[in-house]
Image (cartoon, rainbow, N blue to C red):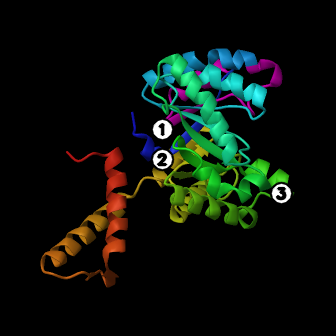
Amino acid sequence: MLEMKYWRSILFVPATSDRFVESALRRSADVLQIDLEDSVAPDEKDFARSRVRTIAGRFAQAGYGVAVRINRPWRQAVRDIEASVGKDVAVLTLPKVPDASYVRFVGEVLDACEAEQGLPIGHTRLIAMVEDPEGLANMGEIAAASPRMYGMIVGAEDLAVSMQMAVGDDTLYIPNVMAVAACRRAGITPIGFVGSVADFDDPDDFRDKIRRARALGFNAAFCIHPRQADIVNEAFLPAAADVDEARQLVAEFESQMAQGRAACTFKGRMVDLPVVLRARQIIERYQAYYPPG
């Protein structure tokens, strides 16, 4: 199973659909996210909860990372958490997170559930979805709210509704850049891209969005359609040519360092330590998917 820090594609799977569950097991996503929220009708919530552990076990056995998106209202959220916590579920995704205190309250419920399940406290990590102006104003605190925090994402559609704005590059650029900054400051994973996950009819446009997201500092993205997972995996994987160049750059820098120099030039560009650290990040990420030897 791919290490959590290198997750790229997180594919939604409605908990109530056998067809989508079976289909997900044939997909290339790094993570399969069992959805208890938007894709589940209100009168099917209990049925969806009753299926989580069985579905999670199948996904984990097949080698996928497993996440569960819960509901926001507290009465539903607590039931969702109680039904989801287990050895096979690595992450809970929290929609419409308003502030850091909400994350900490969820953490208290998780402490009790993990203890009941005989799991280490902290086993279950969290992804926060920022989807309204309150969450937007508190992104820095949300990202750093708990050691359980794994990542954060801007929910484009709900944010647009709450902000009374269109879903587009102009409106979503600043919230997403703010999210990347908050995540990097807190040491968690920036998830997402500038745009709506619902736009999957044009694969070339979606590919451009993910490439832009990678350039902005994102490491992963949610997917609502299987074809998006392939695009996300490819776009968030460093290209072989970039990896070769990074290795050459590091080798040249280390050679110059051995001669007592603190910087060098490589292909007409001045190279110092920050440039080398970025090159090493590219190599490390590539080797997570293609280990040496």
Residue 29: where, in percent of width, then height? 50, 37
* Span highlighted in magenta in the image: 17-45
Quadrant housing the C terminus:
top left
Residue under pointer 1: 30
Label 2 crowd (10 A; few <14 / some 14-19 / many >=20): many
Work out which residue is located at the far right of the displayed protein and give it.
164
| Element on which disc 1 rests | loop
Q: CA distance from mark 2 to mark 1?
A: 8 Å
Amino acid type of the residue tagged 2 in the rendering: Asn
- Going from N to C along the chain, the mark reached first, 1 or 3, is 1
Residue in the image at 31% along x and 70% along y: 276
Q: Is residue 255 left or right of residue 183?
A: left
Of the two numbered discs 1 and 3 in the rendering, the one whose residue sits closer to the viewer: 3
Asked whether disc 2 touches disc 1, contact meaning CB atoms under 8 Å apart, the reply is: yes
* 19, 289: nearer the viewer: 289
- Going from N to C along the chain, the mark reached first, 2 or 1, is 1
Residue in the image at 51% along x and 59% along y: 184
Q: Quadrant of residue 105?
A: top right
Residue in the image at 19% along x and 82% along y: 261
- In the displayed structure, 265 sits above or below 278; it is below
Residue 212: where, in percent of width, then height? 56, 63
